Amino acid sequence: MLSALVWIPVVGAALIGFLPGTIAASRIRQIALVFSAIVFALTLVIASQFDAISIGFQFQEDIPWLDSLGLTYRLGLDGLSLPLLVLGNFLTIVAIYCSDVEIERPRLYYSLVLLLNTGIAGAFLAQNLLLFFLFYEIELIPLYLLIGIWGGAKRGYAATKFLIYTAVSAILILAAFLGLTWLGGSHSFEYDPLLSQGLPLTTQLILLGAILIGFGIKIPLFPLHTWLPDAHVEASTPISVLLAGVLLKLGTYGLIRFGLGLFPEAWAVLAPWLASWAVVSVLFGAFTAIAQTDMKKMVAYSSIGHMGFILLAAAAATPLSLLATVFQMVSHGLISAMLFVLVGVVYKKTGTRDITILKGLLNPERGLPIIGSLMVVGVMASAGIPGMIGFISEFLVFRGSFPVFPIQTLLSMVGTGLTAVYFLLLVNRTFFGRLPEQFSNLPSVPWSERLPGFVLAILIVVLGLQPNWLVRWTETTTTAMLTDYPTIAARSFKGIATQAPIIQTIATEEPISSSDPPGVAIHD
């Protein structure tokens, strides 16, 4: 069943690429939408059958491949990967839907988007280190071409920079995987949390350092971030949606799965430094976003800050903070996708993203009042206004991290306040005031272009009011990750015990009892 999620997009890409005759771009777009919708529907079916209280991987598939290399085709799904898989397949539909109906070279474009979906799904599902690396690399070429062919004026520079940074990321990750397996004496690259046991702490720290830098590039964290603003600014709107909403999550997912998951002892040693690194990324992203005049670049720099929250929560490694990492990943994916969609509509109708030029777009007669209203919702969610998913995710991050790293958590909270500052500047300068004559009588926005913004806004509000719908998938897995690692559990300090009532209230329908399976109960 999991293989279908990986290979159906490949079938769709092949069908689009090799269909005989001339086919209209709109028809190719419809075919791509059908295949992405099938994958998403199947994902929901799998999610409905997922046992939320079961520890370990479910729906596993294990097929021998290259045994001499230790490479097997092994897929599995747990509470860490399931929400991200759903998010990725949903945003693929959004990206295809938002694509220009008359886009040039549609066969290649939609084939690449579907292949990108394959790489993402395979990376989230892979339970073999080499298999993960292969899928991690598969997404590199489609995204490079999607930026380099359909991007803006400096698309070549942005795409090449992305390619170089991501290639370095992959080299470091592969080196860490090879070192862990060979030095650990394993004959297989199967994912095993016990692989690092027996290795000297110095060796673990070196290997974890490669993991941190490799995935830190992908997230990205300061100062490894410089490829991201260029890629976002030059990429088309649909590709920015996938880049911010899904591709960056490969970095945070890898950090938790292969950093915390494989090197708990070394992680505990580096945790204070990781928390400080998170603070630097949060504050750098926020202050740099304030200085931007390009709407898209401002949203791009905001991503750097908000991804820093995930590193802070992962560094704290408490049951609540680790749960918060998944919630923050989904929250950022939905909010950033919505903001990029709306910025794309503004650019399409006005021809500019410069907030020093745009004014008065909320004008109810001659402006873009619906898009402006949705933008207000999006920036409120990003700023952590209660009632939206952004508030829940940031609350969980700060509440889970504070008992372990109080100073770093308080400094990161400053980043939330700064988020309100730069997005208030964006909304105030762009959507309020008098509409300039050059933007009078802007083309109307049809409902087909408003629909993605409305759907994302609904999800942002619904998950903000009902976080249990997301948390119930994840809590057992993230709690079990910590209870399985005494080193991490020991350095989570006494704050873990005080968080149990919050987890019981937010993450479960029923109070946690002694009859629950191991890993759900919170232990001091």
Image (cartoon, rainbow, N blue to C red):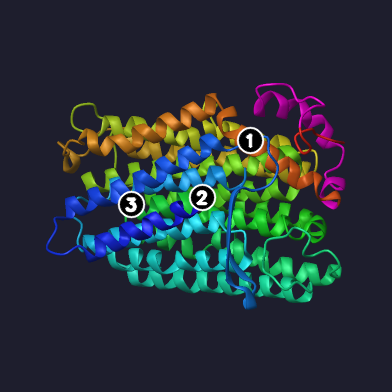
Instruction: Give coordinates of residue 360: x percent, y percent.
Output: 28, 34
Q: Is residue 415 visible?
A: no
Q: Amino acid at mark 1?
A: Ala
Instruction: Give coordinates of residue 316: x percent, y percent.
Output: 75, 46
Instruction: Give coordinates of residue 157: x percent, y percent.
Output: 38, 72
Pointer 2 residue: 303
Q: Is residue 363 left or right of residue 466?
A: left
Is residue 363 found inside the magenta-colored segment of the image? no
Pointer 1 residue: 52
Q: Quadrant of residue 193?
A: bottom right
* Of the two numbered discs 2 and 1 in the rendering, the one whose residue sits closer to the viewer: 1
Tell me the magenta residue range: 487-516
Q: Amino acid at mark 3?
A: Thr
Sequence-wise, which precedes: disc 3 or disc 1?
A: 1
Sequence-wise, which precedes: disc 2 or disc 1?
A: 1
Marks 2 and 3: CB-CB under 8 Å?
Answer: no
Instruction: Give coordinates of residue 246: x percent, y percent.
Output: 47, 51
Q: CA distance from mark 3 to mark 1?
A: 35 Å
Q: Secondary structure at mark 3?
A: helix
The C terminus: image quadrant:
top right
* Of the two numbered discs 3 and 1 in the rendering, the one whose residue sits closer to the viewer: 1
Q: Secondary structure at mark 1?
A: loop
Q: Secondary structure at mark 2?
A: helix
Residue 464 - label: none
Q: Is residue 449 visible?
A: yes
7 or 236, which is in the foreground?
Answer: 7
Q: Amino acid at mark 2?
A: Ser
Pointer 3 residue: 237
Q: Residue furthest left?
A: 22
